[in-house]
Image: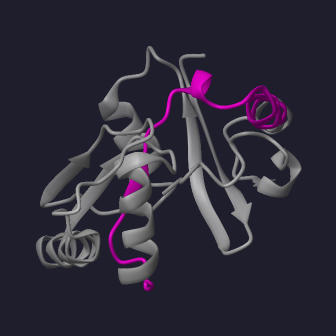
C-alpha cells in the first residue's frame, strides 16, 4: 500500500486518531495528507523524540519519574512541541504515555506513537486491516475492545 488510511480507535478513556501508512510513503505526504487535514495539528516549533527502553526497562532509583513526566509536558507545552514515541506502553514510552495522561489532561500536546505494523499482535493487525479494506481513506472508528485478550491489550498508545 503506497497510500494511507486514517481513522479513530476507541478506548475506554475516549478516542484517538491513527493511520496506517506504507513503508514506501514519504514523511511529507503523511504531514500533508493526514497530520494537517485529518488530525488538524499545526506545525510544531519543536519535536521531542523519546525512544528506546521498550524491553523490561528498570529506571534507576536516581531517575525521578514524576519530575521527568511533569517537566516533559511542561516543556512541550511551553515550546508548542510534538512528542513522538515508539507507540507502545512499555519502557520509557510507557513513562511518556503516563506523563501525557497525568499532566496533559486537556490534550494540548500532540503525542504521536509510531509503531511498526508487524509489532502489533495478529488480532490487532487483522482488525485494522479489515476496517481499512471496508472503508479505505475514509474516517471510521475501530473499537479497541474488539482486540482485547491479546498481548497488546492496553499496550498501544496512539496520538
Q: Report the quarter where the N terminus lies.
A: top right
Side of 129 where 61 appears, left or right? left
Q: Quadrant of residue 16?
A: bottom right
Q: Residue shown at 74%/71% (left/top)?
A: 12
Q: Residue shown at 84%/32% (left/top)?
A: 130
Side of 31 where 37 appears, left or right? right
Residue 149 placed where, x, y %? 85, 46
> Is residue 10 found inside the magenta-colored segment of the image?
no
Q: Is residue 143 visible?
A: no
The answer to which of 69 and 79 lies nearer the viewer is: 69
> Is residue 113 found inside the magenta-colored segment of the image?
yes
Side of 132 where 41 appears, left or right? left
Q: Quadrant of residue 6?
A: top right
Side of 33 where 13 appears, left or right? right
The answer to which of 83 and 71 lies nearer the viewer is: 71
The answer to which of 89 and 49 lies nearer the viewer is: 89
Q: Which residues are magenta?
A: 105-130
- Image label count: 0
Q: Residue shown at 17%/75% (left/top)?
A: 71
| Residue located farthest toward the front when viewing the structure as drawn | 61
Q: Is residue 107 above or below residue 57?
A: below
Residue 54 placed where, x, y %? 41, 38
Residue 144 placed where, x, y %? 77, 54
Q: Residue shown at 30%/33% (left/top)?
A: 28
Q: Is residue 92 above or below residue 75?
A: above
Q: Is residue 66 visible?
A: yes
- Colour scheme of the picture: one colour
Q: Is residue 111 above or below residue 68?
A: above
Residue 32 placed where, x, y %? 37, 42
Amino acid at each position: 500500500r503506497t497510500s494511507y488510511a486514517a481513522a479513530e480507535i476507541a478506548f475506554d478513556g475516549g478516542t484517538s486518531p491513527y493511520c496506517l501508512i506504507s513503508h514506501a510513503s514519504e514523511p511529507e505526504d503523511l504531514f500533508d495528507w493526514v497530520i494537517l487535514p485529518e488530525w488538524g495539528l499545526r506545525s510544531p516549533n519543536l519535536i521531542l523524540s523519546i525512544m528506546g527502553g521498550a524491553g523490561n526497562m528498570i529506571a534507576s532509583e536516581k531517575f525521578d519519574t514524576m519530575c521527568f513526566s511533569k517537566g516533559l509536558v511542561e516543556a512541550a507545552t511551553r515550546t508548542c512541541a510534538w512528542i513522538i514515541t515508539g507507540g507502545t506502553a512499555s519502557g520509557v514510552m510507557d513513562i511518556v504515555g503516563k506523563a501525557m495522561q497525568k499532566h496533559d489532561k486537556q490534550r494540548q500536546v500532540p503525542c504521536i506513537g509510531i509503531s511498526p505494523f508487524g509489532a502489533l499482535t495478529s488480532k490487532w493487525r487483522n482488525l485494522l486491516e479489515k476496517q481499512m479494506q471496508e472503508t479505505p481513506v475514509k474516517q471510521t472508528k475501530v473499537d479497541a475492545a474488539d482486540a482485547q485478550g491479546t498481548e497488546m491489550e492496553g499496550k498501544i498508545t496512539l496520538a
